[in-house]
């Protein structure tokens, strides 16, 4: 064999050995078209789509779902991961959700699996979701998300027959027990002029977003303190002097407290979502708790004992300000409120305005387009 032949022979031999070594190292056959390892399991279990809450207790929830498979909807998955949160579960917050322990092994695809979660908080709402995984570590997509409230569905008692009559109308139960679950059936309650004096029982109306109780005889707002979903509250024309229970209602947008005997506004200091605040005809002189509330557009402080309006300087969202029949002399804070301008209105009649205010500051406001009603 000549030198060229020897060289060619050695090259072919080297290539063959290299190929054998590479195949041995890989150890697994490849698909001729895709080049993927044909022995790998790349098929994830199908997502569970029928997760259901079958029962609730004071501190637990029972759930049921149809088993998914190992590959899509066939076979048997390796394990489940069921999680829960006190708000909506999504793919984004999945890792931060509480993980249920002691889950059963998945049944064959199509069979029914179930599990009970315990240790939950009474009167709390939870979201639940589940995923399945196969033996290769392929996870399914997130299941459908279900919600449930942990509570003991006992009969609610009322201290005021007038209020009970209103509730019976709303739940359509002329007689018989009114259950806690009944009290969750409505989000708006309007009961003006119904001679109500005691709101005991309303604390179970956890889904209320609007409560209208004007022109009654209510003096104690304590039962409202836990209704944190309230957006609209009208308790005008009652007998209120203490509004401290309202401090927890941080989502209030509209609050009407007209014609009561309120002097202290400190409970409103943390209500930073208000856009309408009606405080007409009370005993208010100190408006300091309102300082910095830039979301308030309509403020009614007429018929009170207000002397100084300094806190209104940085309430830059104001467009309607009712200040008539107070003890106001100086409007300087309002004159320099940068939010007041064209289209806004201030009512000032019945105040002992100083000459400087009358001659200069009112003019400043009018020059900026503010309507001054005297």
Image (cartoon, rainbow, N blue to C red):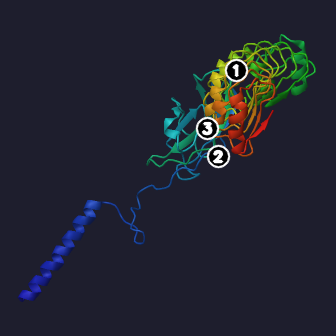
Name the residue located 79 percent from the left edge and 12 percent from the top edge: 219
**Secondary structure of residue under mark 1:** loop
**Secondary structure of residue under mark 3:** loop
The local crowd at label 2, few if under 14, some if 14 to 19, many if 20 or more residues have their Cα within 10 Å, is some
Which image quarter holds the C terminus? Answer: top right
Residue 132: percent from left, percent from top? 53, 43
Instruction: Judge left or right: residue 316 versus residue 77.
Output: right
Rounded to the nearest angstrom, the CA distance separating label 3 from label 2 is 16 Å
Name the residue located 72 percent from the left edge and 23 percent from the top edge: 328
Q: Which quadrant would residue 151 be assigned to in this image? A: top right
In the rendered image, which residue does mark 2 sit on? 49
Q: Judge whether residue 89 can be spotted in this image.
A: yes
- Report the number of numbered marks: 3
The local crowd at label 1, few if under 14, some if 14 to 19, many if 20 or more residues have their Cα within 10 Å, is some
Name the residue located 73 percent from the left edge and 18 percent from the top edge: 284
In the rendered image, which residue does mark 1 sit on? 307
In the rendered image, which residue does mark 3 sit on? 88
Among the two numbered marks 3 and 2 on one chain, the one whose residue lies closer to the N terminus: 2
């Amino acid at each position: 064999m000549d030198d060229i032949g020897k060289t060619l022979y050695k090259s072919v031999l080297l290539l063959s050995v290299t190929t054998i070594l590479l195949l041995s190292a890989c150890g697994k056959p490849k698909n001729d078209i895709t080049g993927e390892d044909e022995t790998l399991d790349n098929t994830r279990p199908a997502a569970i789509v029928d997760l259901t809450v079958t029962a609730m207790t004071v501190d637990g929830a029972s759930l049921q779902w149809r088993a998914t498979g190992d590959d899509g909807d066939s076979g048997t998955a390796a394990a489940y991961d069921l999680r829960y949160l006190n708000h909506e579960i999504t793919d984004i917050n999945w890792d931060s959700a509480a993980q249920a322990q002691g889950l059963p092994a998945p049944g064959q695809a199509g069979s029914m699996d179930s599990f009970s979660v315990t240790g939950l908080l009474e009167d709390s709402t939870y979201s639940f979701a589940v995923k399945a995984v196969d033996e290769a570590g392929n996870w399914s997509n997130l299941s459908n998300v279900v919600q449930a409230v942990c509570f003991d569905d006992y009969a609610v008692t009322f201290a005021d027959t007038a209020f009970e009559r209103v509730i019976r109308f709303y739940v359509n139960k002329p007689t018989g027990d009114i259950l806690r679950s009944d009290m969750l059936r409505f989000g708006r309650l309007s009961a003006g002029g119904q001679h109500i004096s005691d709101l005991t029982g309303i604390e179970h109306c956890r889904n209320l977003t609007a409560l209208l109780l004007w022109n009654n005889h209510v003096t104690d707002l304590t039962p409202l303190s836990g209704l944190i979903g309230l957006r609209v509250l009208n308790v005008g024309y009652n007998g209120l002097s203490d509004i401290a229970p309202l401090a927890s209602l941080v989502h209030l947008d509209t609050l009407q407290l007209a014609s009561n005997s309120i002097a202290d506004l400190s409970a409103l200091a943390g209500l930073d979502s208000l856009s309408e605040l009606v405080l007409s005809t009370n005993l208010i002189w100190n408006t300091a708790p309102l300082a910095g509330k830039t979301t308030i557009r309509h403020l009614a402080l007429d018929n009170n004992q207000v002397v100084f309006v300094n806190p209104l300087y940085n309430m830059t969202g104001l467009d309607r300000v009712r200040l008539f029949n107070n003890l106001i002399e100086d409007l300087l804070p309002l004159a320099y409120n940068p939010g007041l301008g064209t289209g806004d209105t201030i009512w000032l009649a019945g105040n002992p305005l100083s000459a400087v205010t009358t001659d200069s500051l009112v003019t400043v406001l009018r020059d900026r387009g503010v309507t001054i009603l005297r």
